[in-house]
Amino acid sequence: MALFIAEAARAVGVSPATLKRWFRAARVTDVARDRNGYRVFEPEDIQRLRAYANQRIEPFQPRAMSHDLRAPSFAAPATARR
């Protein structure tokens, strides 16, 4: 079953504007269009777009970040200046 952009965006988990931006920027290959010029998304297109969306989203990990901030390169100088 083919989907139009709003339905495809919902299935991928992004906004329609984000999908359009990806296509304009050639980050993903464009999909087929119907005779009126509207994009038509097939199940394979949805899978491909989900894979792209998942590789772009990296969860924020505050523990990893706080560990990095305690690394020696970020540590305060050993002697305080007066």
Image (spheres, grey):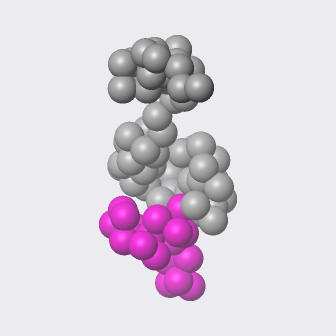
Look at the picture and state if 72 lies above or below 38: above
Quadrant into which the C terminus falls: top right
Q: Position of residue 25 (x, y in %)?
A: 42, 73
| Residue at the (39%, 47%) spot, across then down | 52
Q: Position of residue 74 (x, y in %)?
A: 43, 26
Find residue 71 and report its image quarter.
top left
Residue at the outermost front position = 82
Residue 43 seen from this side: no
Q: Nearer the viewer, residue 56 or 72?
A: 72
Total marks drawn? 0
Say whether residue 18 is magenta.
no
Q: Principal SS element in the magenta part? A: loop
| Residue at the (43%, 15%) spot, across then down | 78
| Residue at the (40%, 67%) spot, across then down | 31
Residue 16 seen from this side: yes
Q: Nearer the viewer, residue 45 or 27?
A: 27
The boundaries of the magenta stretch are 19-39
